Structures are given as C-alpha cells and as structure tokens.
Image (cartoon, rainbow, N blue to C red):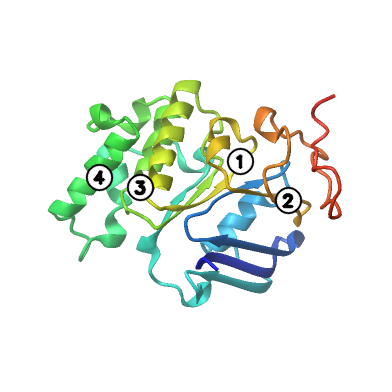
Amino acid sequence: MTESVIALRGVRAELGSRPVLRGIDLTVRRGEVVALLGANGSGKSTAVRSIIGQVPVAAGEIELFGTPRRRFRDWARVGYVPQRTTAAGGVPATVTEVVSSGRLSRARFGMLRKADHAAVRRALELVGMADRARDSVNALSGGQHQRVLIARALATEPELLIMDEPMAGVDLASQEVLAETLREQVAAGTTVLLVLHELGPLEPLIDRAVVLRDGCVLHDGPPPEAVGQHALPGHDHVHPHAPAGAEPIRTGLLS
C-alpha cells in the first residue's frame, strides 16, 4: 500500500455546539489527488481546517505523514490555500511579499536566503504572476489574488497541498492557469486534497472523490457521474454507496 499522507479516523468536530463532522474516515495516500465534495454546510471546509489544526477535534484521530497531528511539527511539508473570501482584503503588501510569507516556514531565523527568493520567483512564474511581482495585492482581480494565494502555498515546495475552493469566484482564464499549475504539481509527485463545489477544469486530475453530507461520508471512490459538468446544488446531490454490482452512483443532475 502507498504511504498515507492524511488519515482521519472517526473524526468529530463542532462549531459552537453544532456538530459539523460526525465521525468521518478519510485517507489520502502519497501522490493522490482527492476532491472533497458536498453542498454548502456539509462539512468540507471544516474537515480540511481540522486537518491543519484550525478547528479542534472533539473525537477521533488525525495523522499527517504517519504522525499524530497534535505532535506534527514539520509544516513546511504542507501547503495550504484557504478560501479567498477568508484570506483576501486590505493587506498592504506587494505580491512578492505575500508569496514570500509562505516561505518563512523554511527560512532560518525568519531571514530569506538566495534559495528562498528563487523559490518565490518559481512560484510566481508557475501561476503566471511574475510580471505583477511588485504590484500591491489590493490592485489585483479576484482571479489574480487567488493565483497569489496558491503561489504562496507553492513557495514552500510542499509535499502535500491542501486547497479550499481554489476555483470559487475565479474567472475562466485564471481557472485554466490554476488547472495547469496543479497539473504540473501532480506530475512532480505532490499529494493534493481539494475542497470543491464543482470539478470543472480540474476533473481530469481527480483520482478520487469523497462526498460529504451533514458531516458524514456518503461516497468515497470515482467522482460521481455528472458532478464534473454541473455545480453541486445546495441540497441532496449524491446517493449513499450503492451495493456491489449496482448501477453507478448518479447525482440526479441529468434531468
């Protein structure tokens, strides 16, 4: 079996007093690209935020690279791209400064060296933003800002890339750039966990889809039929696991 990079076992989480994750199991193995799908409020973002430690876990276990998350310290191995709506706005910094902040986990005493600056330049080139390196992030479009957030994560040269709705509110041109960027990362062996509302141009890269509903895993396997062509609605969108030999899972979006 390929090495497990992310492992969740019986994970439960709450926001306030409201249960959001209800005992989910999830494994992402080295080199896999896994999409976490589901309607709004299904627990997708809470799941990834629990993996990186932003949301406390009420029960269950989480491991990163075989180490319990509570003891995991090697965060330079992990690149995280938050939702743009929670990460953008009002930052008085240039594009280079924002991307460089992603390299600090590898910097000694907070000082960037020649190799760090080179990694920042490579990350900007990967997302097609090298020509905007000196610009303020406040002067960017939504799609360009998303590219900068992805470049910040790539600057760490991560083994694991976790992305929360990377295509949300992004124009088609930026979607294509981001899909090509991700394709290069996958070809280089990066393991990827994506929270998505629709697969869109990322569909050819997805090895497995995990569908959540009300904090529970309903499907873990090939992407459900038609999800790649349609946005998931805000209500039931996929049926529970079908028994062996049954018809493929369908989303009900074809009517």
Separation of marks 3 and 4 at Cα, in angstroms: 8 Å
Query: Alpha carbon of mark 3 to alpha carbon of mark 2: how far?
Result: 27 Å
Q: CA distance from mark 3 to mark 1?
A: 19 Å
Would you name the residue on which mark 2 appears? 212
Q: Please report the residue visible at 79 percent of the width from the left and 29 percent of the height from the top.
A: 253
Cα gap from disc 4 to disc 2, whole angstroms: 35 Å
Quick one: label 1 or label 2, which is nearer the N terminus?
Answer: 1
- Mark 4 or mark 1, which is nearer the start of the sequence? 4
Pointer 1 residue: 196
- As measured in the structure, the alpha-carbon distance from the residue carrying label 1 to the one carrying label 2 is 11 Å
* Residue sitting nearer the eye, 33 or 247: 247
Residue 29 percent across, percent down from the top left: 53, 61
Q: Position of residue 251 (x, y in %)?
A: 79, 36
Q: Residue at x 24, y 33 (%)?
A: 133
Mark 4 lies on residue: 120
The numbered mark, 3 or 2, whose residue comes first in the sequence reads 3
The kind of residue tagged 1 is: Leu
Q: Quadrant of the C terminus?
A: top right
Mark 3 touches mark 1? (CB < 8 Å): no
Please state which amino acid type lies under the numbered disc 3.
Answer: Leu
Comes first in the chain, label 3 or label 1: 3
Where's residue 46, x and y in %?
63, 55
Tag count: 4
Please report whichever mark, 4 or 2, sits nearer to the chain's N-terminal start: 4
Residue flagged by tag 4: what amino acid is it? Val
Between residues 67 and 206, which one lies in front from this camera angle? 206
